[in-house]
Image (tube, rainbow, N blue to C red):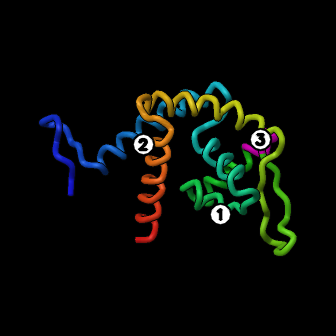
Amino acid sequence: MPLQNDMPGRPSGLAYLVGRLDHVLSRRLRDSLAPLGLSVPQYTALSVFRAQGSLSNAQLAERTMVSPQSANEMVKTMEAQGWIERRPDPSHGRIIQISLTVAGHAVMQRCDAEVVKVEAQMFPDLDTPQRTALQAALRGAVRALSEG
């Protein structure tokens, strides 16, 4: 059931608000990461590598919500920067595993500081338990929509 419209003439449904948040957040992240030489998709990809370890290009594309072709181009750029490395999968010769390098971890530390600032600006009044609850709710929403 959509939320009541708290301001006449303005959409206020959850789907609309999440979409607006995505748009504004993407712009803020882009502005924060650009001086460090990263795009938002690159930051997302490096975050996925840090959390998951090594992945194939297909797995990266799925987890970062880009096409395999876009993921491949992104991998080439990040490899040229020295942030990631590619190695053949020991159990399957045709699969290439991609993982973060020391330089990739270093650039992530610099980017994380900027992302934390954006997140703090986004939810200035939430305390740690509220942030934890919000993260759990958002994960649950992603999981529920991914299954359907």
Residue at (64, 30) in percent of width and height: 113
Residue at (45, 48) in percent of width and height: 133
Residue bearing the label numbered 2:
22
Report the predominant secondary structure element of the magenta stretch: helix
Q: Are marks 3 and 2 in contact (CB under 8 Å)?
A: no
What is the three-letter code of the residue carrying label 2? Asp
Up the image or down, 112 lies above or below 136; here it is: above
Task: For label 2, count other residues whose C-alpha is less than 10 Å away and answer few (under 14), some (14-19) or many (20+).
Answer: few
Q: Does the segment drawn in magenta span residue 79? A: yes
Residue at (17, 37) in percent of width and height: 6
Residue at (44, 32) in percent of width and height: 122
Q: Position of residue 9 (x, y in %)?
A: 14, 37
Task: For label 3, count other residues whose C-alpha is less than 10 Å away and answer few (under 14), some (14-19) or many (20+).
Answer: many
N-terminal of the pair, mark 1 or mark 3, is: 1
Q: Position of residue 24 (x, y in %)?
A: 41, 35
Q: Nearer the viewer, residue 89 or 134?
A: 134
Q: Which residues are magenta?
A: 78-83
- Which mark, by number, is residue 59? 1
Residue bearing the label numbered 3:
104
Q: Position of residue 7 (x, y in %)?
A: 16, 34
